[in-house]
Image: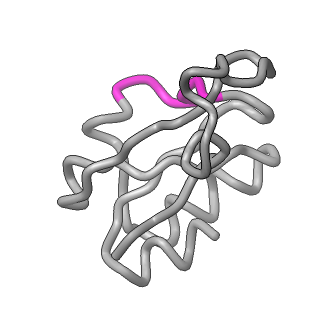
Amino acid sequence: AALRAVERGWPVFPLYPYSKYPAVRGWPHRATCDLDQITRWWARAPYNIAIACQAAGLVAIDLDAGHGQPPPPSRAGPSANCRSRIIA
């Protein structure tokens, strides 16, 4: 998936496995499309993948309900269950 993002010109960086926390310090400046760096990062661990949205020219909207809880009834609806979608 990281390579597919890079094919679109979107710089990526690793997140700790099963989290949303960057696995590299200074990630805004270290996100990259360099295939050698990406290969080295992901050879170390089964990292999650993050895209540096600003550098990629993307806007992201995170619609997580929060910590595994369902959304409150006032927010329930078709879009409340969207986890992650890329609209390009």
Q: Which residue lies at the image location 38% right of the left edge and 33% below the top edge?
A: 27
Q: In the picture, residue 29 is in which quadrant?
A: top left
Residue 37 % position (x, y): 50, 59
Horizontal relation, residue 28 to residue 23: left or right = left
Q: Which residue lies at the image location 55% right of the left edge and 48% below the top edge?
A: 79
Residue closer to the observer: 83 or 72: 72
Is 6 magenta? The answer is no
Residue closer to the observer: 69 or 86: 69
Point out the image quarter for the N terminus. bottom right
Total number of numbered discs in the rendering: 0
Q: Main secondary structure of the magenta part?
A: loop
Residue 70 % position (x, y): 76, 24
Residue closer to the observer: 51 or 76: 76
Q: Which residues are magenta?
A: 20-26
Q: In the picture, residue 9 is in which quadrant?
A: bottom left
Horizontal relation, residue 5 to residue 82: left or right = left
Asked if 49 appears above or below 57 in the picture, the reply is: above
Horizontal relation, residue 48 to residue 54: left or right = right
Q: Which residue lies at the image location 64% right of the left edge and 26% below the top edge?
A: 65
Horizontal relation, residue 24 to residue 26: left or right = right
Asked if 43 appears above or below 3 in the picture, the reply is: above
Is 24 magenta? The answer is yes
Residue at the extreme front of the image, as rendered:
74
Asked if 19 appears above or below 1 in the picture, the reply is: above
Q: Which residue lies at the image location 18% right of the left edge and 60% below the top edge?
A: 57
Point out the image quarter for the C terminus. bottom left
